[in-house]
Image (cartoon, rainbow, N blue to C red):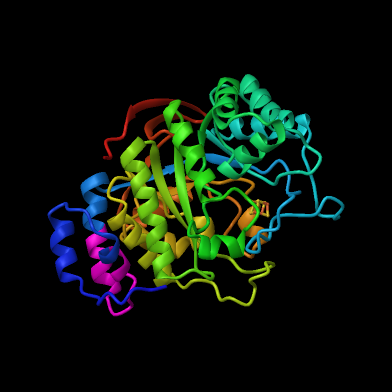
C-alpha cells in the first residue's frame, strides 16, 4: 500500500544538507515522480561526495556460478535449471580450480561465488569449493554464498547458522555477497520467491556473519511487482541492521531483467527509474559507506550516469557472469581495466582500484597488494 504523503523536496533537502536522517514517510515521498529527478540526483550527489569525494571505485573480479540446478523456482529467475534439463550443469573440482587459476592470472582480487541449490549436492560440496580455491589461491578473496545458500546448508545439515558460517570462514570464506534480498516485504516476497529463505532468515545470516567479523553487501531487486512502499520498507530494514552491526559495505540496487522469466510481460525498468532508485538509496542509507552501480544490469551508460546520482562504485571487470545474461542483459561479459577506467573518467570521477574490503590496490600487472583502507564513512 502506498501512503498518501505529499511530495516536496524542500524539507528533505534541508535535512539531508544538515546531515539529518530521513523518516520512512519522507523516504517514501521521494519516489513520487513529481519530484524532479535531477534535483534528487544533486542531493544524492551531495551525500556521495561527502562520503567518497570524487572516487569512482572498481575492482578486478571474476564470477563463479558452480551450478545452475536449483530446487527453487523464483519467478524472476532465468538462471535456474531443473535437475534433468539439458542446460543444467554443475562444475567439478578441476573446472573450479581452472577458474581460480584463470582469475589469478588475470590479476583478479576477488571471486564472486553464487549459484543454485542443487538437489543432489550436499553441504560438503559447497564447503569444498571454498576450501580448494582458498588452498590453491590464498590471495583471491572469496565473496561467496548468499543467505539463501547458507540457510539451505543449515537445512541440509541441521546445524546452526553460526556453526556453518564459522566453518566456511575457517575454510577461506572472505565475505558475503548481497544477493537473495530481492524485496523483503512479504506482500512481494511471498509472490516472487515464496520458498527460499525469508526476510527474517536473510537478516539473521548477515547479523551472525557481521558478529564473527565477516563483512557483507546488500541488494534490492526493483522494477517488477513491488511499489514505492515496498522499496522504502526494504531500505529502512537495511538501515536498521546497519545501525546495529555496521557490517555492510555496499548497497547494490539491481534492475530487474524480465527476459526468460515468468515475469517476461513486465517491461524493464527505465534508466530514469534506475537513477531515481540509486539516488533515493544513497539518501536513505545514510550509514552505508558505498553504493554500487552494477554495470552488468544497468547497462554501461546508466552506470556511468549513476556515478552522479549517488553511486561511488561501478563493480568490476566481471568475467563469466551468467545470471543476468540468462535474463537478457545485453552488456558485454567482461570489461578490460582500461575500459572501466575510461568509463569512470568520462563520468568525471577518479578511477581507484579497490579490493573487496575497500583497500586501495597497488598493482604491477597481475601482482598486487592491498594498501590503506579508503576513507569512506
Ligand atoms: S534466484 Fe536463486 S534460489 Fe531462486 S530459483 Fe534462481 S537460483 Fe534458485
Count of numbered labels shown in the rendering: 0
Instruction: Give the main secondary structure, helix, strand or loop, of the magenta stretch.
Output: helix
Q: Position of residue 153 (x, y in %)?
A: 66, 35
Picture quarter with the C terminus: top left
Q: Quadrant of residue 374?
A: top left
Judge by depth and name the residue closer to the eye, 225 or 137: 225
Q: Position of residue 158 (x, y in %)?
A: 68, 31
Is residue 174 positioned above or below 10 on the image? Answer: above
Picture quarter with the N terminus: bottom left
Q: Is residue 17 left or right of residue 173?
A: left
**Residue found at x 41% / y 52%:** 342
Q: Position of residue 166 (x, y in %)?
A: 55, 24
**Residue found at x 69% / y 56%:** 79
Q: Is residue 205 left or right of residue 260?
A: left
Is residue 294 positioned above or below 102 on the image? Answer: below
Q: Position of residue 237 (x, y in %)?
A: 39, 51
**Residue found at x 65% / y 73%:** 264
Is residue 96 positioned above or below 344 on the image? Answer: above
Q: Is residue 287 left or right of residue 126?
A: left
Quick check: can you spot residue 199?
Answer: yes
Magenta-drawn segment? 27-44
Quick check: can you spot residue 330?
Answer: no
| Residue 32 drawn in magenta | yes
**Residue found at x 67% / y 28%:** 127
Q: Quadrant of residue 236?
A: bottom left
Q: Is residue 242 left or right of residue 76?
A: left
| Residue 25 drawn in magenta | no
Judge by depth and name the residue closer to the eye, 261 or 197: 197
Amino acid at each position: 500500500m502506498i501512503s498518501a504523503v505529499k511530495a516536496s523536496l524542500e524539507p528533505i533537502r534541508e535535512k539531508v544538507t544538515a546531515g539529518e536522517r530521513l523518516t520512512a514517510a519522507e523516504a517514501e515521498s521521494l519516489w513520487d515522480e513529481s519530484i524532479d529527478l535531477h534535483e534528487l540526483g544533486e542531493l544524492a550527489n551531495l551525500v556521495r561526495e561527502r562520503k567518497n569525494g570524487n572516487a569512482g571505485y572498481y575492482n578486478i573480479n571474476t564470477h563463479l556460478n558452480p551450478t545452475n540446478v536449483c530446487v527453487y523456482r523464483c519467478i524472476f529467475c532465468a538462471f535456474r535449471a531443473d535437475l534433468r534439463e539439458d542446460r543444467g550443469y554443475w562444475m567439478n573440482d578441476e573446472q573450479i580450480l581452472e577458474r581460480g587459476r584463470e582469475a589469478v592470472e588475470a590479476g583478479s582480487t576477488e571471486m564472486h561465488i553464487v549459484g543454485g541449490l542443487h538437489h543432489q549436492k550436499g553441504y560438503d560440496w559447497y564447503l569444498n569449493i571454498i576450501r580448494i580455491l582458498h588452498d590453491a589461491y590464498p590471495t583471491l578473496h572469496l565473496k561467496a554464498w548468499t543467505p539463501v545458500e547458507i540457510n539451505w546448508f543449515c537445512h541440509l545439515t541441521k546445524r546452526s547458522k553460526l556453526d556453518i558460517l564459522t566453518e566456511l570462514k575457517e575454510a577461506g570464506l572472505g565475505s558475503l555477497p548481497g544477493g537473495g534480498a530481492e524485496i523483503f516485504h512479504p506482500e512481494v516476497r511471498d509472490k516472487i520467491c515464496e520458498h527460499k529463505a525469508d526476510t527474517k532468515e536473510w537478516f539473521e545470516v548477515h547479523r551472525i556473519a557481521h558478529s564473527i567479523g565477516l563483512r557483507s553487501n546488500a541488494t534490492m531487486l526493483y522494477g517488477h511487482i513491488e511499489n514505492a512502499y515496498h522499496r522504502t520498507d526494504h531500505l529502512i530494514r537495511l538501515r536498521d541492521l546497519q545501525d546495529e552491526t555496521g557490517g555492510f559495505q555496499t548497497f547494490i540496487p539491481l534492475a530487474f531483467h524480465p527476459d526468460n522469466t515468468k515475469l517476461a510481460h513486465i517491461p524493464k525498468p527505465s534508466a530514469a527509474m534506475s537513477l531515481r532508485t540509486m539516488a533515493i538509496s544513497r539518501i536513505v542509507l545514510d550509514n552505508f559507506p558505498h553504493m554500487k552501480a552494477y554495470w552488468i544490469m544497468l547497462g554501461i551508460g546508466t552506470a556511468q550516469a549513476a556515478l552522479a546520482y549517488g553511486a561511488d562504485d561501478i563493480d568490476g571487470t566481471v568475467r563469466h557472469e551468467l545470471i543476468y545474461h540468462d535474463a537478457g542483459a545485453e552488456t558485454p561479459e567482461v570489461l578490460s581495466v582500461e575500459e572501466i577506467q575510461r568509463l569512470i573518467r568520462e563520468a568525471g570521477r577518479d578511477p581507484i582500484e579497490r579490493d573487496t574490503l575497500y583497500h586501495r590496490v597497488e598493482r604491477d600487472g597481475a601482482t598486487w597488494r592491498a594498501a590503506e583502507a579508503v576513507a569512506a564513512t
